[in-house]
Image (cartoon, grey):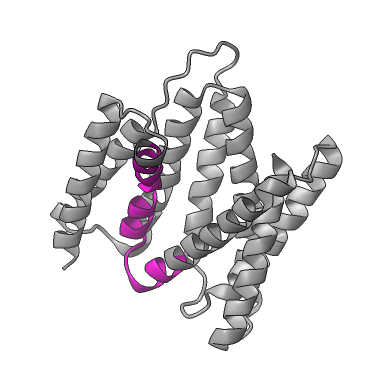
Amino acid sequence: MFGVVLMSQVTGMVLAAAFAIIRGEGFPGPTDIGLSVLAGILGGIGISALYRGLAVGKMGIVAPITGILAAVIPVIAGIVFEGWPTVPVLVGIAFALVAVILVSRVPDERGGRSGLGLALLAGTTIGLFGVVMSRVTDGHVFVPLVILRATEGVLLGAIILLTRDQWRPPRRLVPAILGVGLLDMTGNATYILAIQTGALAVASVLSALYPITTVILAAVFLKERLARSHAIGIVLAGAAIALIAAGSA
């Protein structure tokens, strides 16, 4: 498990370095370097706790708690740093948070521990990751991504050594892992650009709607049946996006 994450993070780091060179992005100052390292530590802990929680806990508890904390923490920080958004945006944020809960719900009849502690750790650290990255100086995008990806790589490498986890994925999975690394890096880069050009509360809550894409793709390609809660969540997400767009115009 950790080996898959490590490979995807290294892929993202290499791609981010290439884009930084193409873009001619300057090297950040000490403060931005420190923030990038801190974001890498938070992101590495968050993704590891999430994957571990999904593996050993109840997905129906781990997924929604992680999702809602990852959205709520940056929203609160955005309001503190940038002030209250307009009423339509606030209503849209509320709709989006409910949508995250509904779409992240996964029926899980397994016994055993719930994974609540891992979910709280994952959601908190992922949420703080977004807040920390919002403090990076505007204009710095890909170099901070290189630094945080390198930090995550070191952290994941240490976890692999300590847990003696099998880190080499099957060769047939390598292309998919490389694709995950590309998509993950793209998502982080566009998120950074969004918080540098717009409101943190809006960018964070919209980015937290990513489970909707997963649910829709599973329905289209894997022919998975949409649960009623998922369908309601998708409708609420659409309404949230419309309200936030209208209120931000």
Q: Position of residue 145 (x, y in %)?
A: 59, 68
Q: Position of residue 163 (x, y in %)?
A: 82, 36
The C terminus, quarter of image: bottom left
The N terminus, quarter of image: top right
Residue at 85%, 39% in the rendered image:
162
Q: Is residue 4 above or below residue 164?
A: below
Q: Is residue 218 above or below residue 16?
A: above
**First to last magenta residue range:** 192-218
Residue at 25%, 40% in the rendered image:
234
Q: Quadrant of residue 191?
A: bottom left
Residue 200 belongs to magenta span:
yes
Q: Is residue 60 above or below residue 201?
A: above
Residue 248 belongs to magenta span:
no
Return the residue found at the far top: 111
Can residue 117 be seen at all in this image of the molecule? yes
Can residue 31 be seen at all in this image of the molecule? no
